[in-house]
Image: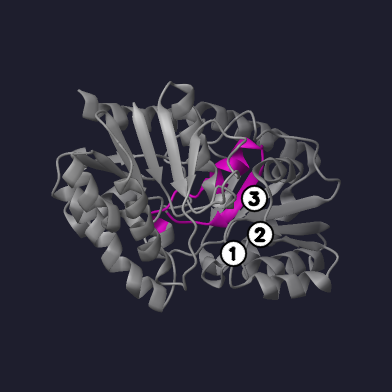
C-alpha cells in the first residue's frame, strides 16, 4: 500500500526512534512509504523510505500551523491515486484533513502524547488536539493511534471517539540496535529525553549528590534538550560525576545506554505523564538497565510478570528510597536483574508487535 507519513518531528529527535522503527518496518513488509517532514533534503538517505523535505521557520506556537499549510500545498500537487493512506501527527492534522476528505484518502492520526508543553503553548495546543481527534470521531475513513490503555481511555473521554476507532501502539524497540553491552566501571545512572523542568529532571543531580554523600560511588548522564539544559550543563561543569549531552545519534544513544546500569524516570504524576508510554522506559529495559522512577500508570508496564529490576516509588520519597535501594545493589545483583529486564523486553517490547498493530490498522482500509 502507498503511505504518506506527515510529521513535524525530525528523525534526529531522541523521541523519534519509534517513528523510524515503524516506518522501516512497514517498508520491509512491502509498503511504499514517503516520509514528509522538515528535515533537510538528503538527511534520510540512510533510511529505506522516500523523503520529502518541507522546511519551516516559525516562532513557537505557530510552527505546526504553518508547517501543516506548507505540507498541504505540497500534497495538492501530488497524484496520490487509489490505495493511498496518510499518517499524520495530530499537531498538523487540521490543515491536511480537509484535503484528505476531498480526495477520499483514509488517514490515521498518530498521537504519541497530548500537549505536554506548559503555559501559553499548552493553551494554544489543546484546541488543536481536540479538533484533530473529533475529525476521527466524525469520519469512518479514519483511525487514531495512542500509546497506552490510559491514553486510549483519556482520548475517548475527552473527545467521544469510539473504541473501535483507536489503535494502541506501545513503544516498541529495535532489539538488534539496543542491546546490553560492557558496563562502565562506576555505577552509572542515565536519563534521556526532553530536559524540561516540568519533567522532573532537576531532581536528578540532587539524587546523585545525596547518593554520593551516602557512600554510593555513582555518576549521572543526562541526554537531551529543553529549558533545563543550560542549568544542568552549568552543574556538570562543576561536577566531574555528571555528563550532559545535548543530543546523540540513535546508534550512539544505544551504545551509551548499553554501558549504563540504571535508567531514570523522574516525570511526576501529572495528566500528561500518567497516560504516556515513554520510549525511554522500553529502551532502558531492552539494554538490560535497572529502572528507577516515580510510581504512576505512565511508568508502569501493563504486565502481570514480576519486574524486580524496576523500582517505582512515590514522588515524595524519590530521593530517600533511592538511597536505600542503591545501597542494596551490587555487581551480581545488577547483572542478574539486567538479564531479567532484557528477557522481559524480548518477550514484550520488540518493535515487530508495534509494526503489526500499525499495519493491521493500515490494511483495515483495504478490506
- Binning the other alpha carbons within 10 Å of mark 2 as few (below 14), some (14 to 19) or many (20 upward) gives many
Where disc 3 sits, the SS reads: strand
At a point 73% along the width and 57% down the height, the residue shown is 221
Rendered residue at 55%/33% (across/down): 345
Between marks 2 and 3 in the image, the one whose residue lies nearer the viewer: 3
Q: Which residues are magenta?
A: 274-296
**Which residue occupies 80% across, 64% down?**
212
Residue 134 in sight in this render: yes
Is residue 41 depicted above or below 50 in this figure?
below
* Circles 2 and 3: CB atoms closer than 8 Å: no
Most foreground residue, 287 or 10 = 10
Asked if disc 1 and disc 2 are in contact, CB closer than 8 Å, the reply is yes
> How many numbered markers are drawn?
3
Look at the image and tell me whether residue 303 can be seen: no
Q: Which residue is mark 3?
A: 263
**Quadrant occupied by the N terminus:** top left
Give 206 or 182, whichever is nearer the viewer: 182
Gap between marks 1 and 3, in whole Å? 14 Å
- x and y percentages locating residue 313 in the rendered image: 54, 58
Magenta highlight on residue 283? yes
**79 in magenta:** no
Going 71% across and 68% down the picture, which residue do you hit?
Answer: 205
Q: From what the image shows, is residue 309 above or below residue 229?
A: above
Q: Residues within 10 Å of mark 3 (few under 14, many from 20)?
A: many
Residue 203 lies, in percent from the top left, at 63, 69
Separation of marks 2 and 3 at Cα, in angstroms:
12 Å
Q: Which quarter of the figure has residue 342?
A: top right
* Marking on residue 318: 1
Dot label at residue 322: 2
Q: Can you tell which quarter of the image residue 162 is in?
A: top left
Q: Which of labels 1 and 3 is toward the front? A: 3
Q: Position of residue 184 (x, y in %)?
A: 82, 45
Amino acid at each position: 500500500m502507498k503511505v504518506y507519513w506527515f510529521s513535524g518531528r525530525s528523525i534526529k529527535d531522541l523521541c523519534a526512534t519509534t517513528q523510524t522503527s515503524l516506518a522501516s518496518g512497514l517498508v520491509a513488509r512491502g509498503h511504499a512509504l514517503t516520509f514528509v517532514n522538515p528535515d533537510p533534503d538528503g538527511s534520510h538517505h540512510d533510511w529505506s523510505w522516500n523523503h520529502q523535505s518541507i522546511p519551516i521557520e516559525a516562532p513557537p506556537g505557530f510552527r505546526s500551523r504553518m508547517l501543516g499549510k506548507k505540507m498541504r500545498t505540497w500534497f495538492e500537487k501530488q497524484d496520490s491515486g487509489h490505495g493511498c493512506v496518510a499518517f499524520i501527527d495530530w499537531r498538523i492534522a487540521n490543515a491536511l484533513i480537509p484535503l484528505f476528505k476531498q480526495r477520499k484518502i483514509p488517514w490515521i492520526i498518530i498521537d504519541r502524547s497530548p500537549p505536554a508543553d506548559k503555559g501559553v503553548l499548552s493553551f494554544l495546543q489543546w484546541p488543536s488536539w481536540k479538533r484533530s481527534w473529533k475529525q476521527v470521531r466524525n469520519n469512518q475513513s479514519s483511525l487514531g493511534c495512542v500509546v497506552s490503555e490510559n491514553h486510549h481511555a483519556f482520548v475517548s473521554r475527552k473527545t467521544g471517539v469510539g473504541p473501535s476507532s483507536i489503535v494502541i501502539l506501545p513503544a516498541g524497540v529495535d532489539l538488534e540496535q539496543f542491546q546490553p553491552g560492557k558496563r562502565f566501571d562506576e555505577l552509572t545512572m542515565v536519563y534521556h529525553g526532553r530536559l524540561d523542568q516540568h519533567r522532573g529532571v532537576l531532581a536528578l543531580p540532587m539524587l546523585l549528590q545525596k547518593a554520593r554523600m551516602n557512600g554510593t560511588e555513582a555518576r549521572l548522564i543526562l541526554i537531551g534538550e529543553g529549558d533545563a539544559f543550560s542549568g544542568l550543563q552549568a552543574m556538570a561543569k562543576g561536577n566531574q560525576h555528571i555528563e550532559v549531552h545535548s543530543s546523540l545519534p540513535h546508534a550512539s544513544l544505544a551504545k551509551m545506554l548499553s554501558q549504563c546500569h540504571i535508567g531514570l524516570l523522574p516525570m511526576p504524576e501529572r495528566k500528561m505523564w500518567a497516560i504516556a508510554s515513554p520510549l525511554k522506559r522500553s529502551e532502558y529495559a531492552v539494554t538490560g538497565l535497572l529502572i528507577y522512577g516515580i510510581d504512576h500508570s505512565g511508568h508502569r508496564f501493563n504486565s502481570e510478570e514480576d519486574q524486580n529490576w524496576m523500582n517505582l516509588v512515590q514522588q515524595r520519597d524519590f530521593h530517600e528510597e533511592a538511597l536505600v535501594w542503591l545501597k542494596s545493589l551490587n555487581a551480581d545483583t545488577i547483572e542478574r536483574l539486567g538479564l531479567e529486564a532484557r528477557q522481559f523486553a524480548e518477550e514484550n517490547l520488540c518493535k515487530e508487535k508495534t509494526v503489526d498493530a500499525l499495519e493491521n490498522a493500515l490494511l483495515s482500509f483495504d478490506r
